[in-house]
Image: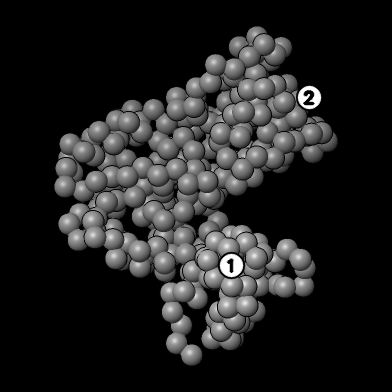
């Protein structure tokens, strides 16, 4: 049977919604029709993509792998069919948080000066690779260890870690903090794209409580209301100020690598090499 784009859209809707019912409502089709479409796709691929053994559907290992491929394929089709792409194709730069720190605005301004015919779009996407593996961006600024297959990375700089604590707390009165200082508080962990894990602390001296969040806004809120403390990098204070939090140097935590990443072997946007050169030059100048 010939596969069509509707098969990919149906699978992605199921993967994102978690149930056939909600996916069918989102696609404005009946549940039986959506189930048939999924079976046709699985039959074509010869693998089970969705585990139907529970009330809440779960993707199989093959399904998780295929999700990124399907998302990238649809993104490429959507880009090809976008009428705006016939004149100018923007270069999409993704990031999950903090972008290039205080160099973000200078980078965008300098790009506009040096490449006026190629728009540079900065996109925050709450994802471990900022949408790079799903084809949502052409290149991404990522922090920490990158494990996604098929990506090329280049180290731009290593950023010092900072402690992030609520205004009015006893920690806010100190000029410098340590991991041990933070361990007596619950620690907010961004489980989607953060670089902080309990492995930062020595075994036996780790925080006894954590608060898991899915993005930077939730992370900032948890700290601002006094429910937790956090750890980030020196880029965060420059882009994420908040009247209810303060940033303090963290004395005993290792730095975090800031990487520029793009897809290996893919045709890619022709302006990616220009962006790499500019980002590298601006970091060196700073």
Relative to 240, 244 lies left or right? right
Rendered residue at 63%/22% (across/down)? 224
Picture quadrant where residue 124 is located: top left
Q: How is the image coloured?
A: one colour
Q: Secondary structure at mark 2?
A: loop
- Residue 196 is left or right of residue 76, and the answer is right
Toward the top, the furthest residue is 173
Q: Is residue 171 above or below residue 211?
A: above
Give residue 40's position: percent from left, percent from top.
Answer: 56, 84
Residue 279 coordinates in the image, percent (x, y) = 32, 40
Identify the mark at residue 213; answer none if there is no mark: none
Q: Sequence order check: which comes first, mark 2 or mark 1?
A: 1
> According to the image, label 2 marks what residue?
184
**In the image: residue 105, left or right of residue 51:** left
Residue lying farthest bottom?
1
Instruction: Mark yes or no: residue 29 visible.
Output: yes
Q: CA distance from mark 2 to mark 1?
A: 47 Å
- Percent x, y of residue 243: 55, 16
């Amino acid at each position: 049977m010939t596969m069509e784009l509707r098969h990919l859209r149906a699978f992605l809707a199921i993967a994102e919604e978690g149930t056939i019912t909600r996916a069918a409502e989102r696609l404005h089709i009946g549940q039986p029709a959506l189930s048939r479409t999924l079976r046709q796709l699985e039959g074509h691929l010869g693998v089970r993509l969705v585990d139907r053994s529970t009330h809440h559907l779960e993707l199989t290992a093959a399904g998780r792998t295929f999700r990124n491929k399907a998302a990238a394929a649809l993104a490429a089709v959507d880009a090809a069919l976008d009428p705006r792409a016939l004149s100018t194709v923007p270069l999409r730069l993704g990031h999950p948080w903090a972008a290039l720190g205080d160099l973000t605005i200078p980078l965008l301004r300098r790009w506009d000066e040096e490449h006026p015919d190629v728009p540079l779009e900065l996109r925050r996407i709450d994802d471990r690779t900022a949408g790079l593996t799903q084809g949502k961006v052409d290149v991404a600024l990522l922090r920490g260890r990158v494990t996604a297959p098929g990506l090329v990375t280049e180290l731009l700089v290593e950023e010092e870690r900072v402690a992030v604590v609520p205004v009015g707390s006893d920690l806010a009165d100190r000029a410098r903090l340590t991991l041990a200082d933070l361990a007596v508080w619950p620690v907010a962990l961004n489980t989607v794209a953060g670089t902080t894990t309990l492995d930062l602390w020595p075994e036996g001296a780790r925080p006894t409580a954590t608060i898991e969040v899915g993005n930077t806004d939730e992370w900032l809120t948890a700290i601002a209301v006094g429910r937790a403390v956090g750890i980030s990098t020196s880029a965060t204070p420059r882009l994420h100020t908040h009247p209810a939090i303060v940033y303090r140097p963290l004395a005993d935590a290792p730095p975090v690598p800031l990487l520029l990443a793009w897809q290996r072997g893919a045709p890619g946007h022709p302006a990616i090499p220009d962006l790499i050169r500019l980002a590298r030059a601006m970091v060196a100048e700073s």
